Amino acid sequence: MKKGMKLFAVAVSVLLLAVAVAACSEETKSYNDGTFVGVSGKDDKGAYGEVTITIEEGTVTDCKFVTWQEDGSIKDENYGKVNGQISNADYYAKAQLAVKAMKQYAQDFLDKKDIKEVKSVTGATIAHSQFTEAVESALKKAEK
């Protein structure tokens, strides 16, 4: 009985070790060096995100993120204005929060090197979704 228990304990230990090794050996993707552009799908207003990433020696070294409006203009310091004027201060503030978040998303991705670690900013969740989708698109193009 003792010998059987020892064999059982060894078998369970080997099985647990195999499961642990399999879980830790998630496939690491490798990327070609270069500059890659990824684009998200359009939101309900026709806007979409575009990411440009630069990869050197397999690591992302630069990331730029812009969101294009349906009319072809970039969401920048003028986003939220009407005819170049701030006609609704609350709307403009919310629009500019999204613009600020876009820069933060790109910097966070550069710092963390993992899109899953880039957290959404409250009030800029659509931009976060577009950013994530665009980064995944760009990285897919960069895969070896």
Image: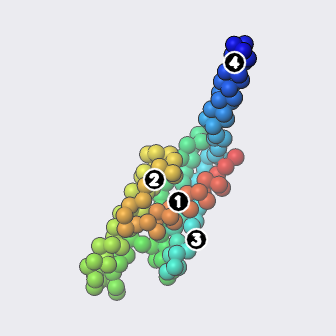
Cα–Cα gap, marks 4 and 2: 48 Å
Which residue does the image show at 63% across and 37% down from the upper left? 23
**Marks 3 and 1, the one that precedes in the sequence:** 3
Q: Which mark is residue 132?
A: 1
Q: Secondary structure at mark 1?
A: helix
- The amino acid on which the numbered mark 4 sits, given as a three-letter code, is Met
Q: Which residue is mark 2?
A: 118
Of residues 62 and 1, the one drawn nearer to the viewer in this rendering: 1
- The amino acid on which the numbered mark 1 sits, given as a three-letter code, is Thr
Q: Which mark is residue 93?
A: none
Of residues 20 and 12, the one drawn nearer to the viewer in this rendering: 12
Horizontal side, residue 48 vs residue 100: left or right:
right
**Marks 4 and 1, the one that precedes in the sequence:** 4
Q: Secondary structure at mark 2?
A: loop
Horizontal side, residue 34 vs residue 8: left or right:
left
State the image coordinates of residue 4 (x, y, percent, origin top left): 73, 17
Assess whether mark 1 and mark 2 are in contact (beta carbons under 8 angstroms).
yes
Q: Which residue is mark 3?
A: 41
Of residues 37 and 43, the one drawn nearer to the viewer in this rendering: 43
